[in-house]
Amino acid sequence: MSLETLDAEIIVVGGGAAGLTAAQYGARANLKTLLIEEMAPGGQALIIDDLENYPGFPEKISGFDFTQRFTQQALNFGAEITNATVNSIKKEGNVFVLDTTKGEKKAFAVILATGAKHRKLGVPGEETYSGKGVSYCATCDGPFFRGKKMLVVGGGDAACDEALFLSKLSDNIVMVHRRDRFRAQKALAGRVLDNKRIDVRFNHEVVEIGGDGKKVTSVKLLNNADNSQYEEDFAAVFIFVGSLPQTALAENLEKDEAGYLITDQEMRTSLPGFYVVGDVRATPFRQLIVAAGEGAVASHSAAQYIDALEGNSYD
């Protein structure tokens, strides 16, 4: 199949940091590159309040402004970005065929950057009050509860980041974690522990989220150190207890025990021409800088793969 009959040489599925970088590097390599994103480009970076640890940005920058720059840079190099949902991906010969809400899209290579979604607690009241005081995004919903008592659940980087953001809105933030210490980066965890507006309670779990039918009013907590339970009033609950990799488009590919897709160091999967990057990939460290690096590597690998298909390999 010739390039004229394809929609792109590389199709990137997902517009977070990994996907946007992959699109940028694919287009920069003079390959026709299409990025498909069902929401707005930016991914989880969009909800970061202050991004402070990305190299080259010594001053804090909002996640929104940061991803706007990412997106514009990909466009500047010639990448095309479209809003659509990808329903399935199959390979026919040397061509990948993607069924999307905007019709079939065909390419020689696919880079999957679908990321991960927030994991839920699975406790009574969580679904009932989702959007009514239960939230998975402090920067999105925190301002609605300014000055009120809020609960943060989790002990990783995301939970600490969001607790610090909420502490700017209220001096009555409680943070619970089921372990006896945070698993967040040491510097980040230290800032939370030093923040007088945040009451950190280790060895605590949420048992039930209560409300009046319209909004959250209380939470039942378990102290797993002594197995005691108690109920406490809260106006909102912000949950950050890990992520679920979005692997539905690659169900037949190899995954690790946590369900993340496995690749080699060049982001290649067992299916030639299919690459995986970002939070959907098995990696020891999930950060924007890592995701961006993976996107660049994947596009480089895809370019070599396409060269070989077209008989231009330099091996």
Image (spheres, rainbow, N blue to C red):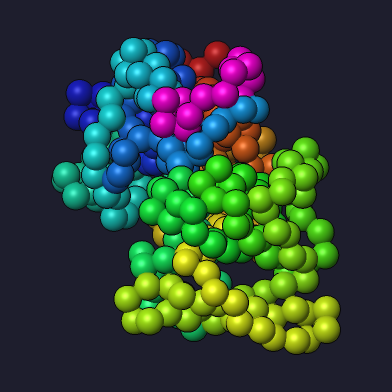
Viewer-nearest residue: 305 or 291: 291
Give the x, y percent position of residue 282.
63, 49
The percent position of residue 272, horizontal first and vertical second, equals 49, 41
On whether residue 284 falls in the magenta region, the answer is no
Quick check: 76 above or below 294?
above
Residue 26 on image: x %, y %: 42, 22
Q: Main secondary structure of the magenta part?
A: loop
Q: Which residues are magenta?
A: 54-67
**178 or 117, which is in the foreground?**
178
Q: Which image quarter: residue 82?
A: top left
Taking the spot 46% from the left edge, 25% from the top edge, the residue there is 66
Residue located 67% across and 53% down the image: 198
Q: Answer with the quarter of the image where residue 7 lies.
A: top left
| Residue under the image location 66 percent in, 35 percent down | 265
- Please name the residue shown 76% across and 53% down the image: 183
Quadrant of image for the N terminus: top left
Q: Quadrant of residue 34?
A: top left
Quadrant that contains the C terminus: top right
Along the line of sight, which residue is nearer the eye, 230 or 305? 230
Vertical placement of residue 208 versus 239, above or below: below
